[in-house]
Image (cartoon, rainbow, N blue to C red):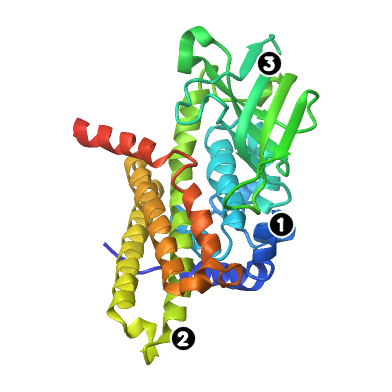
Amino acid sequence: MDFNLTEEHLMIQQAARDFAQNELLPGVIERDEKQIFPTEQVKKMGQLGFMGMMVDPKYGGSGLDAISYVIAMEEISKVDASASVVMSVNNSLVCWGLQEFGTEEQKQKYLPGLASGEIHGAFCLSEPEAGSDATSQKTTAKDMGDHYLVNGTKNWITNGNTASVYLVIAQTNPELKHKGINALIMTKDMPGFSVGPKEQKMGIRGSDTHSLMFSDVKVPKENRIGEDGFGFKFAMKTLAGGRIGIASQALGIASGAYELALKYSKERKAFGTEICNHQAIAFKLADMAVNIEAARHLCMKAAWDKDQHKNYDVSGAMAKLFASQVAMDTAVEAVQIHGGNGYVKEYHVERFMRDAKITQIYEGTSEIQKIVISRSVIAG
């Protein structure tokens, strides 16, 4: 075992940290308050190689490992989770799914733009009646010979209005249940494709979350990913990697909240001394530090498993389950350490608390992660 980061990893960490502090921090409170999508910041993330980190260089990507991705996600999420979720979806779900399972023509057509940040993508699985139960797809893709006719609705889609490429999961053969589901590449300019109003969210308010509606959308057969009926397996395999991204986002939220709480505790005085000298505060900081370090190790282990081409279903689920709980707990305690100031926007920690909650919900709720983990434990 070697717990040291390589020189390349350290350079990526510093580049991500500098970008977050210099490009994301200015205006982050206003973007959150006014629900402004970080358009320019996302473009710059693409220019720095953060939007296609694991994409092969022959398709315009950075060709980096999953550990590099975890490192960058943590640093960016320390400052702006709304920006990091755009990066996570584009890397983990869209680029990885296309590179791993797409045809050469699909890769050549879509990956260069996605990896460069010139465009970004969306992953469309959730529906009004298909959240955790992803097998209950009501969106249909009727086989019409040389194309599919798609009808239905998708909910809570990150990058819903700003994306250019949409990976849509739809049911083609209901009698086959989950084995009749397909994954299709769609674009917003297809007739019958419409975008609903922006969701009014508690957290990650700068991210672009919408419902999508499809009314007789004609999708060419060459836009299908994999063989007929591969869609559900595609979604599950892609989400397994996506959980590493969201675990890393949760880790970053926790780290960012902790760093602000630690700094504040060394500046704020009460009863004649800095509040970090009071055991009540010192012990909170100790718990935060331990839990964040444990979460980081789980994230790195899952990323290492992926890099080593090992099965990372369970390690990814463990990382997401634990890191998301740490994000929530740490953000709440960071607000507490700030006292009344923690309830005020200018100190940032109230935003971390609101942003943390979604990490326990999207890309598989904590309860779903426990199902994945418990099945593995019981099976031995």
Amino acid type of disc 3?
Answer: Tyr
Q: Nearer the viewer, residue 218 or 334?
A: 334
Query: Where, quadrant-wise, is the N terminus in this rendering?
Result: bottom left
Q: CA distance from mark 3 to mark 2?
A: 62 Å
Residue 65 in sight from this viewpoint: no
Which image quarter: residue 296? bottom left
Residue 196 in sight from this viewpoint: yes
Tag 3–tag 1 contact (CB < 8 Å): no
Q: Position of residue 159 (x, y in %)?
A: 66, 44
Q: Position of residue 5 (x, y in %)?
A: 39, 68
Amino acid type of disc 2?
Answer: Glu
Residue most extreme to the top? 175
Q: Earlier in the sequence, mark 3 or mark 1?
A: 1
Disc 3 secondary structure class: strand
Which image quarter: residue 50? bottom right
Query: Where, quadrant-wise, is the C terminus in this rendering?
Result: top left
Q: CA distance from mark 3 to mark 1?
A: 39 Å
Mark 2 Cα within 10 Å, few/some/many (few <14, many 20+)? few
Q: Residue at x 68, y 53 (%)?
A: 116
Q: Which residue is mark 3?
A: 148
Q: Residue at x 31, y 60 (%)?
A: 294
Q: Which residue is mark 1?
A: 34
Q: Earlier in the sequence, mark 2 or mark 1?
A: 1
Q: Nearer the viewer, residue 320 or 240?
A: 320
Q: Nearer the viewer, residue 329 or 241?
A: 329
